[in-house]
Amino acid sequence: MKELLLKSDGFSRRQFVNQAAKTFLGVSTLPLVAGQANAAGRLGSDSVPINRPLARNIIYLYMSGGMTHLDTFDPKPDHENGGPVKAIKTKADGVRISEYLPLLATQMDKACVFRSLSSTKGAHEQGNYFMHTSYAKRATIVHPCMGAWATNFQNRSNTTLPGSVIIGGGSRFAGSGFLGSQHSPLTIGNPSAGLQNSKVMRGVTEEQFDTRLALAGKLGVKFREKYNLQASKAYSDMYTDAIKLMSSKDLEAFDISQEPDSMNELYGKEAFGQGCLLARRLVENNVRYVEVNYGGWDTHQNNFVSVPEKAAILDQGLTALITDLHSRGLLDETLIVLSTEFGRTPRINQNAGRDHYPKAFSGFMAGGGIKGGQVWGATDESGENVAENLVKIPDYNATIAYALGLPLGQVVYSPSRRPFTIADSGEPLTHLFA
Amino acid sequence: MNIKKLCCLALIIGAYQSHLSAYTFTLSDGTSLEGKFVKFENREVYIKTSDGKIEQVPFSGLAQKTQDELIKLHKKNQAAKKAKYNAAPKKDEPVLKARPTPKREPAKSVTETPLPEIKAVSSKIDQLLQQGYKENGVTALPQANDETYLRRAYLDIIGRNPSHDEAKAFLADNSKDKRTHLVDTLLDSQGYNSHTYIWWADLLRLKDRFPGGAGNYGGPVAYVKWVKDAIQANIPYDQFVRELLTPEGYSWNNGAVGYYMRDSGMPLDNMSNTVQVFLGTQMVCAQCHNHPFDKWTQMEYFQLAAYTYGIHTRVNSPVRNKAQAEMKNLYLEKLDKEGIERNSKEARQAEQDLRRSFGRASQEIFKPLGYGVQEYDNRHLQLPHDYQYTDAKPKDRVEPATLFGNGIDLSKFEARKDAYADWMTSPENPRFTKVIANRLWKLAMGRGLIEPVDDIRDDTVASNPALMDYLEKQMVAFNYDMKQFLRAIYNTEAYQRESFTGELSTIDHFPFQGPVLKRLSAEQIWDSLVTLALPDPDNRKASFSKAQSKLEAFGKYEQILNSKTPTEVVSMIKDGAKMEKEMNEKMRELQEEILVAQKDEDLAKLRDLRKEYGKIRRTMETNYMIIATGGVDIMEGGKSMGMTYYDRMEPDAEDETYKGFSRNIVRASELPNPAPAGHFLQEFGQSDRELIENANDEATIPQVLTLLNGQQFLSLLVKRSPLAAAIEAAESNEGKVRAIYLAILNRQPDAEELAACLALADTHPNTLTKVKLTPDQIKKLKANKSGYLAAPWSDIIWAVLNTQEFLFRI
């Protein structure tokens, strides 16, 4: 990419994006690029040599609003900041988590808890952006999220389905940024509703649809001949692909109604559980990056009433995801990441709530080659300060990129010719991997 | 003396250095030193002796007597300072001086400028283009037919297809100057305002939310309204830019404050954006180092940024400051009464408790007055800490200086931003006029004389330099009247030719043999569909009346708070804290009941409880406002003090024309800024308004899926839609096919297209038994049948919409 972009001197940046999309990243020329990009990605990063099996997929669970760390992954039962929350034993020796996550406790042998995340952004929007991109939010550029970086370097595994999917409204910042709209994730609002507009409209028969298509084809001939330009040809390609997708077997990946009841029971019927279930189906169908958004963590008031409720849903969905992927043999190649924009003030406020707290908070990863049963980093007894092994947000993201084998040090130029790298200058925590 | 006390003293002495004149410092060994106190640092006292030398003496090395005296002096001065602090707001706390938006007059008809004046400009443009053709060895493309011209003019000037009836009227018109008339009509129409708004919204990154908290209290909605009003009044472009760059006050004083609030907390980025939009120049690289591809140095970047660095988007209220001082006083008095040492641990704890219980109340009450635009004379920009060049040192203060054009004499201006705006918008500024002339040329012709339009450098050459020069001069001659300028372009022969059908890259010097083909913008596609579905689409406007009354209420709120004494404010804060505590208690109780209901799986009760809970939560802000205003709900029961797009969608009494049509069927300019994720507009590449001109026209699979299977299609088939009405009105199958073509592609079908459509229509079971019905019978049928057009017409409409022709403007 770098060479390509540098060659583009004198080109407009938008022009470049267009050209790149059509010549190099367009659907019709995919195999060529897939080869090249994979080669670049799999060679390993410029700075970190990789000698282990790589994760292929990411399921990224985003706790929107700022998840309280003290009441989930970093309980402090012996300190007044801890409130009424107890710590419970888990399947991993010496690892204790909050009593609000009893199911997850049985899977901690497969997971790594991070207790020393530290951010500098205390507002939702800025924190969310930073967590997703590793860069501070600016008014002159939009940075890509990990899903876009992944498809940029390694391309899509499945050429019919999109490279990345965001479920549940999602973050406005989990986009493709300057990498261009061909890396934009597909957004699914309601996980139970499937892919929008992928079925023939109600009341229209298959036969009628075919009649319509045939007529449209005829009526469009002259225009396509006269204006045989890239811009219009791109639409011809997209019509072909869209119609292929409508009748493709892959479309079933979006349809969770095909799951047995037992699966719905396992994951939970709430949107988050259903989102996790859809994420599993998509990953099974080679969608590389799936983000499931779970909001409502902004517990300024009555923290100890709303967190147990939220945590119960998280507990069920996340545990189901781990066990289900494990039993299907997909956990090793799928990294599950849990993140949030910041933690919450260890000190309980006058409304029995907790406020925004970026200085020290928790994260969680499982699968994708990460060693289970670990805790990385720690806060002090009050939960207010990182006591050891501070993890900056870019480090956390670099660790995700490392799991996928993305080239961390490689400079990529935005169309405005500014240099960027995945995870900024973050250092991956390579020793956490098996 | 322990370290803590020493640190404390550092503050004490630091604060009083100015009060110390020559003084005799006695040292612990009994010797003494005559001199002036300079500073206290690292537990050492710096003393300037009469011969100008600086002596460093450890604080512990001072005699006890001197130590005590310094401390005593501190205490004495503390009282004085407190009194001074309470008496007046901080000296560097200027009072916000609002600059209200000037009154806008409705735009004059473009026809008030005589047509010959315009035509003279149009011919000169054509003449300069002809010279260009000669030099490039090309010939002009042939004149476009009326059908092509019609669709193009509507899309370019007002951003949508002509409706069936509009197309029919134009094509039937035999007058010689009908094209010129059409341009005038369109420029004077509401459609022009809609289209121009979208153009500005992309450039200015207009959103219904601002980053951080700056978006609350009407900022975005007032900004949107400001832009719409300015377009409606067709104020000259240079005035538009000047007003944007020099606002002061709250959003209820002047919506243009949104220009700075949009980039709240990012003043350097704001400057980069200003230069990109209005001067077509990219400077952002130079924020961190000298520009690698252009000539700009980091120093030049900071010098320019120094003009606007004094502008704050968070403002302090002097009333609040006074009240807080008063609260502190009360607290200190209480401590004294209770005999608690002021500096003790208990005192600190007490202060913290005080902050906790009243801090939030004070914050809530004054929040609406916290976001505005205010320039601070004394806020100066410094170079970054890692400045690496030799012309200055890191952290040096930077004096403002301009990039090119004439320098500015700052003393002639009231504020730095006024000087900046004056330089920016001057006709003498070599890029200001060039950029707007080039952008408007692109708007009409599909491509700029200079590409890209916003990366102009010293060595940039326009594809027709003589024409570029001429357009700049004309822009000045038209006094930056955008409509007259466009009118001249739309009246050229060049604009009326067939469009160029070759591939073009930015580096090609295109001589404009004709306009350039382009994919319709997301808004043009949407608005064209709206035109098929809704009668008179341009006049259906989002209402601002609710937003307006909220903004006025904020203005009133500001007046009320500013008229309060500190004592009144303190009691207000106390009431607020009490209210919040009570409400929290209620919410806690409710939450517990919710948990019980959850366990019992009592869904009905759960729903009620949640509703109740949400209600209390929402009324908190309103309650604060009621407390602050002494019992008046100036929001009149408005849900929240924050304001969103939906506050403006409260319908005014709407015209009969639109009765029964969904409120979502409305032009893009009246929808949220930007449309929500997943909306048709976003799908087709509407700008997310995060970056300047961030729309894209790339083809995607979801777009095609939307065209194939999207529900939007149904609104075209509703029998009251103008499209359906045109089809119903035609009698024969051929007439109906022609109506479909005229409405969607604004032309007649050719013989083959007609035959293909009729092959379907004439053999369709729905049309075979069709007999001519009387109006009465039709009425009855309508009442009985579904309200939608059926096959074969729905099939043909669908097919015509799914030709690529609909997506492109030729």
Image (cartoon, coloured by chain):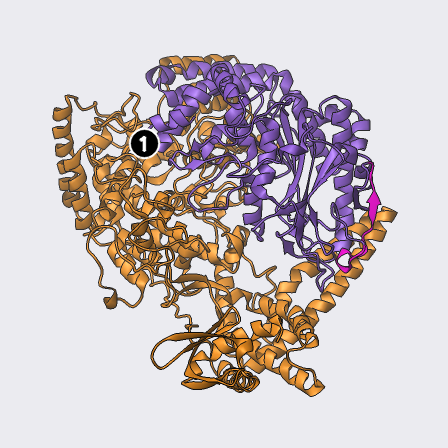
**Mark 1 residue type:** Arg
Q: Is residue B805 visible?
A: no
The N terminus of chain B appears in which quarter of the rendering?
A: bottom right
Mark 1 surroundings within 10 Å by alpha-carbon count, few (fewer than 14), some (14 through 19), many (20 or more)? many
Q: Colour of chain A?
A: purple
Q: Chain of mark 1?
A: B
Residue in the picture at 22% in, 63% down: B409
**Side of B18 relative to B606 (left or right):** left
**Side of A21 relative to A93 (left or right):** left
Residue B476: in magenta span = no
- Seen in the picture, residue A63 relative to B95 is either above or below; the reply is above
Residue B738 at x, y percent in the picture: 40, 23
Question: Number of labelled discs?
Answer: 1
Residue in the picture at 61% in, 16% down: A248
Q: Which chain is orange?
A: B
Q: Quadrant of residue A15?
A: top left
Q: Is residue B637 visible?
A: yes
Residue B70 at x, y percent in the picture: 52, 83
- Seen in the picture, residue A116 relative to B123 is either above or below; the reply is below
Q: Secondary structure at mark 1?
A: helix
Residue A84: in magenta span = yes
Q: Which residue is mark 1?
A: B152
- Seen in the picture, residue B488 relative to B248 is either above or below; the reply is above
Residue in the picture at 31% in, 63% down: B416
Residue B493 at x, y percent in the picture: 19, 31
Which segment did they paint magenta? A78-91
User: Of residues A183 and B10, which is closer to you in this image?
Assistant: B10
**Side of B53 relative to B117 (left or right):** right
